[in-house]
Amino acid sequence: MGYGICNLSVIPVRSEPSEKSEMVSQVLFGELLEIIQMTNNWCKVRLIYDNYEGWVDIKQIIPLSEESYSKINDFPQSLTLDLVQILVDDTRNGMFPVVLGSCLPNLVNNTFYIDQNKYTYEGQVTDTGAENSKENIIENAYMYLNTPYLWGGRSPFGIDCSGFTQMVYKLNGIKLLRDAKQQAKQGETLNLTSEAEPGDLAFFDKFDSEEENITHVGIILKNNKIIHASGKVRIDTIDHQGIFNTIMNKYTHKLRIIKKII
């Protein structure tokens, strides 16, 4: 039916076309989406970045022609590297905050355009086409430390476990799918925890669960530590059994698989 782009700081993606419906993900400024269905004031969309589907309020996106969509999608995008920074809307004489990992299409000399609207951004940016490394992944992961847990969240003001890993890898030009179960199908499986390196992904289910149902993911650090979103983005101990929370003094997640993405 067409395409669109988020031109607000962060907008919710819901499971049904209602403000009362569960938030299943978020769209950050500059992220593209495909409109696949419309009903009343709601659009069912497919997010271009990870093919995730859900409903957004039509008032929170800008429709794009196929030509405008291609101009944005066919070129590398710069990503914001500040936790939060001001973006200036020069065309409409306004300004608003954008969060870490927002997209700035075709940024040149601190300016870019979405259709006819001109924007200025003077914060830190990273090029999605730049060479990535596990060291950068760890560095970016620490930027989200102490972010509160939020189901469906993808921002430094609230994030879930797979949103956290997706955004950290996104900042390094690597695409992960949206949910932990989907991410567990990507990359190369490692057979032993001793084979894992800082920056690899570890996947879990609840420690008291009898079923093998992956529900959690985190990023491995050195010295048998892991950074993950559980209550908040935190650092805990990991071993062959799973994640041990020292504050709760118990294992909270059972290790299922470790994946090497890069």
Image (tube, rainbow, N blue to C red):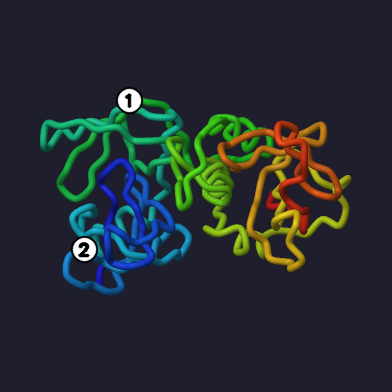
Type of the residue with mark 1: Glu
- How many residues crowd around disc 2 within 10 Å: few (fewer than 14), some, or many (20 or more)? few
Q: Secondary structure at mark 1?
A: loop
Q: Is residue 154 left or right of residue 3?
A: right
- Residue 22 is left or right of residue 236, and the answer is left
Instruction: Report the front residue among 23 and 2.
Output: 23
The N terminus, quarter of image = bottom left
Q: Residue at x 72, y 39 (%)?
A: 226
Mark number, residue 122:
1
Q: Estimate the x, y position of residue 211 in percent, counting from the top left.
A: 74, 68
Q: Which residue is mark 2?
A: 65
Between 9 and 173, the one nearer to me in the picture: 9
* Residue 168: percent from left, percent from top: 56, 42
Residue at 79% over, 41% down? 238
Q: Tag 1 or tag 2, which sits nearer the N-term?
A: 2
Amino acid carrying mark 2 in the image: Ser
Please indicate, yes or no, whether residue 129 appears anywhere in the rendered image. Answer: no
Q: Position of residue 117 (x, y in %)?
A: 16, 43
Residue 2 visible somewhere in the drawing: yes
Disc 1: CA contacts within 10 A as few (<14), some (14-19) or many (>=20): few
